[in-house]
Amino acid sequence: MKESGEKISMLTAYDFSFAKIIDGAGIDVILVGDSASNVMAGHETTLPITLDQMIYHASSVIRAVNRSLVVVDLPFGSYQSNSDIALASAIKIMKESGGHSIKLEGGEEVLDSIKKIVSAGIPVMGHLGLTPQSIYKFGTYTVRAKEEEEANKLRNDAKLLEDAGCFAIVLEKIPASLAKEVSASISIPTIGIGAGGNCDGQVLVMHDMLGINTEFKPRFLRQYLNVAEQATTAVQQYIKDVKSNDFPNESEQY
Ligand code: KIV
């Protein structure tokens, strides 16, 4: 798709019902993101979610998917210690969830792990720029790699990830000009989120783009629906109908 110039569409999903809708709509890639920690479990960061919880979400998604590529995030703590632990975590995800590939955050620091996982036959997606598992190192969710030193590290990391065998790289919240340059400098696709229009694909968190989660409104987000508003109206109508004895009516009973 990168070679032919066709942009890659990717969205997150964490459960069977939404994965069925997203897969049926024709998405290219479904990411079972560790953002499940935020949007499904209500945690402030992605750090608390466990490997077993990721497997639960991923296996629910896999049961719904007929055609999309499913990428599953390795959660915080499941790969940072050493490459043997990283490989064991990746194998556990592949075996127990049925996912098609894994994603992990970081560049040079996780290179040995990426090589080991790729050698085991597991496709790996990289993730550079704003890497939310390192939020307590960054201290803020602001745009990354604006300074030359961090931009140079990202340029270098992208090449290392390509050489290590990653099949794609997520670029999160970096300047559009840097994302454009990196996308042109490597042969594997880049998938951007808050990284401008010159990445080879785009990803959004489903709850943000459908307007389920309405508190998160960064500049890069395009909201396609307001599910929170519509669901609230529907629930309020249901409450009214129950209270007024309008529901159920004659045709809604046995
Ligand atoms: O966990 C996630 O949803 C992600 C995307 C934001 C890329 O990693």
Image (cartoon, helix red, strand yellow):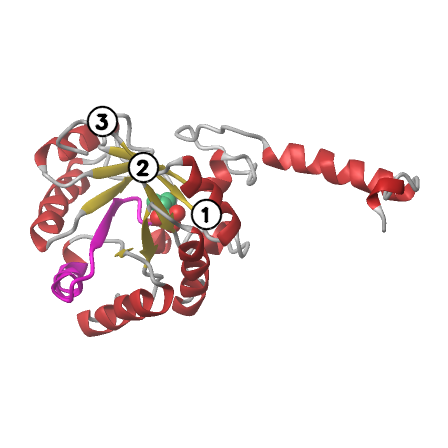
- Secondary structure category for the residue under label 1: helix
- Return the residue nearer the eye: 87 or 249: 249
The quadrant of the rendering that contains the N terminus is top left
**Residue 59's x, y, as percent?**
42, 61
Task: Quote the CA–CA distance across marks 3 and 1.
Answer: 27 Å
Q: Residue at x 67, y 37 (%)?
A: 231
First to last magenta residue range: 110-131
Task: Provide the residue designation for mark 1.
Answer: 19
**Residue 55's x, y, as percent?**
40, 64
Sequence-wise, which precedes: disc 3 or disc 2? 2
156 relative position to 225: left or right: left
21 relative position to 3: left or right: right
**In the rendered image, which quarter is residue 218 located in?**
top left
**Residue 44's x, y, as percent?**
50, 53
Q: How many marks?
A: 3
Nearest to viewer (mark 1 / mark 2): 1
Task: Provide the residue designation for mark 3.
Answer: 198
Check if residue 158 falls in the magenta segment: no
